[in-house]
Amino acid sequence: MSVAAHADTNESLPMEDLKVFSEIFGKIKSDYVERVDDGELLKNAVRGMLNGLDPHSTYLEPEAYREVNIDTRGEFGGLGIEVTLDDNGLIRVVTPIDGTPADRAGILPGDLIVRLDEAPVKGMALDEAVNRMRGKPGTTIDLTIARKGAPKPIRITIERAVIHINSVWAQLLEGHYAYVRVAQFQSGTAASLRRELTRVKKEAGGTLDGLVLDLRNNPGGVLEGAVDVSDVFLRQGVIVSTRGRTEDSRITFNATPKDYLGGAAMVVLVNGGSASAAEIVAGALQDHDRAVILGTKTFGKGSVQTILPMHNGAALKLTTARYYTPNDRSIQARGIVPDVLTGDLAFADPGGVSVALREANLVGHLGQEATVEEPAENAKASRTRRQDSDYEVRAALNLLKGINIARRYAD
C-alpha cells in the first residue's frame, strides 16, 4: 500500500510513516480521556499538516468553501479587516480596509486581537477566528484589543455590515499634481482608476504633471487587479511573474503599450500594511523606474494561494507559487524596500503606536528561497489622513516637483 505524492515526483509516502500515523490515531481513539470523533481527528490532522507549511495554507470546510464561491451579497456581513496569525498563535491585524466597520471603529494595523466576544483567540485557528468575525449584517461583535502603548486591553464593539469597498478615489493636491488612493485591488480597480484619473485630469485643465499613488495599508486583493493597475502606467515589459513547482503555476504577465499618464512623474506611497497585490504594483513600477517608492518597507506577502476542491465538498487553500518582480526579485518575507525611506517621521501619531508586523514575523512563514533577508525597520501605524496634514503626501508632492525641475534642466 502507498499513497502517491505530488505528480511531478516518483515518491510515495513510506509505509513506516503510515504505520506510525495509524498507531497514533489508534492510541488517541483507545486511550484519550474522552471519546473523539474520527472525522474531527482527521480534520485536525489535516489542519496540522497545513499549519506546519505557512500562515496562508488552510483547510476550508464545505460551508467556508461555499462562501468563497457564491455571491452572498445582502446575506454576508463582515468587519472589513485583514488579519493573520502572529508567532504566538494570536490574531494580529494587518490593516483595516478604508471605510469599513473596522476602519470606522478605530482598529489599527498591528493591533493584537485577544478575545472575540468572550472567546480567547489563543490557539484558535485563523479560519475559525475569521468565521467568528463574519455574521449577519447589523449584528455586533466585541473585539478585545492589545495595542502597543496602551496600558490595558481595549474593548471595541463593531457592527457587522456588507462590505462595499470603494477601492479608488482621487483629488487634486495643487496645480497639476494629483493624489490617488487605492484601498484594495479588485477586478474592476483599474477601470475605476482610469475614471478617477480622467476626472482629475479634467479638473487640472487636461494634463497632470505628477501623481501620488497611495498604497499604504492596502492589504492586496486579486492578482488581476494588481496587473491591470500596473498596466495603466507601464508601456512595455514584465509586470509580475509567478513560479511554483507545477507547470500551471508558472505565469508571466506583460504590460500593453499605453501609459495613461503619458510619462508624468509618479511617487508611490507604501508602508508595512502594504501587502500582496499592493507589493506587486510597487515592485513593477520600481523595477521599470516608472515611479519613486516612498515610505517604509512593505509587508512581504509574496505567495500565491490556489483553492483545490476536495471530493467531500471542502477545499484546500494551498500556497502554490511565489511572486517575482520584473527584475526577478521575490517579495516573499522581504517586501519592497522604498527608494526613499521616511521612517518614524512618516506619521507623528500622538498615540505613539508603533508596529513592525510583516510576513517574516509570522509563524511558519514561507521562506525567501536562497537569499539573505534585509533587516526590518519600524513603521508607524496609521489611519488614512487628510492630505494637507499627511507628512508623506507632502514629501511626495515636493519630490514630484523636484523630479520635474530636474527633467527640465536635463532637457
Image (tube, rainbow, N blue to C red):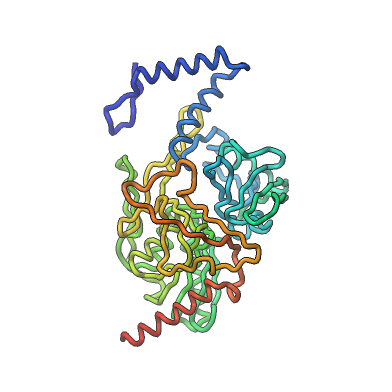
Residue 245 horizontal side relative to residue 88, left or right = left
Q: Is residue 410 visible?
A: yes
Which quadrant is home to the C terminus?
A: bottom left
Residue 270 coordinates in the image, percent (x, y): 48, 63
Q: Quadrant of residue 41?
A: top right
Residue 74 coordinates in the image, percent (x, y): 65, 48
The image shows residue 22, relative to residue 299, as above or below, that is above
Give the residue drawn at x 59%, y 36%: 124
Residue 310 coordinates in the image, percent (x, y): 46, 31
The image shows residue 373, relative to residue 366, as above or below, that is below
Q: Nearer the viewer, residue 371 or 5?
A: 371
Q: Nearer the viewer, residue 233 or 304?
A: 304
Residue with the most extreme left position: 10
Give the residue drawn at x 65%, y 66%: 350
Q: Nearer the viewer, residue 409 or 206?
A: 409
Give the residue drawn at x 50%, y 31%: 47
Residue 287 coordinates in the image, percent (x, y): 34, 64
Give the residue drawn at x 51%, y 82%: 204
Q: How many marks?
A: 0
Which quadrant is home to the N terminus?
A: top left
Q: Is residue 158 visible?
A: no
